[in-house]
Image: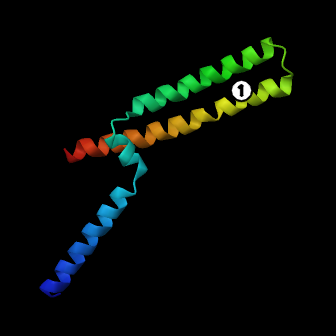
Amino acid sequence: MTDIAREAKKRAKTATDDMLTTLDPIKALSDTGFKSSWAYLGGFASIGLSLATWLVSRGKGDDKPQSDRWGIFIGHWAPTFFALGIALRHQEESDERRA
């Protein structure tokens, strides 16, 4: 392989790596200072908020289907927060290894 080909290959790899880093929303979120523990906390908070919303809705005399919908709607946030927490934890570990 010639020097020109090696240099072109090196530049292509650098450009590809830069593009993937730029398009990484988890890295961007981590770089802004958002921590995985905050995402986990959000997941647990959404579970509690889901239960509280369901109980309050039932206590106000709302019909059962409407109460269930509110609880389920907010309860669906928990897996998203936990998934973000896991992704952020991996990013944090990756950043620690590079440092």
Residue 1, image x, y percentages = 17, 87
Q: Residue at x 84, y 14 (%)?
A: 61
Say which quarter of the image contains residue 43.
top right
Q: Secondary structure at mark 1?
A: helix
Q: Say if 24 sits above or below 84 in the image.
A: below
Residue 72, image x, y percentages = 71, 31
Say which quarter of the image contains residue 57.
top right
Q: Residue at x 52, y 35 (%)?
A: 81
Q: Residue furthest right?
A: 63
Q: Say if 69 sits above or below 60 in the image.
A: below
Q: Does 83 sit left or right of 67 as displayed?
A: left
What residue did someone put label 1 on? 71
> Toward the viewer: 27 or 89?
27
Location of the C terminus (image quadrant): top left
Q: Amino acid at mark 1?
A: Gly
Q: Residue furthest left?
A: 3
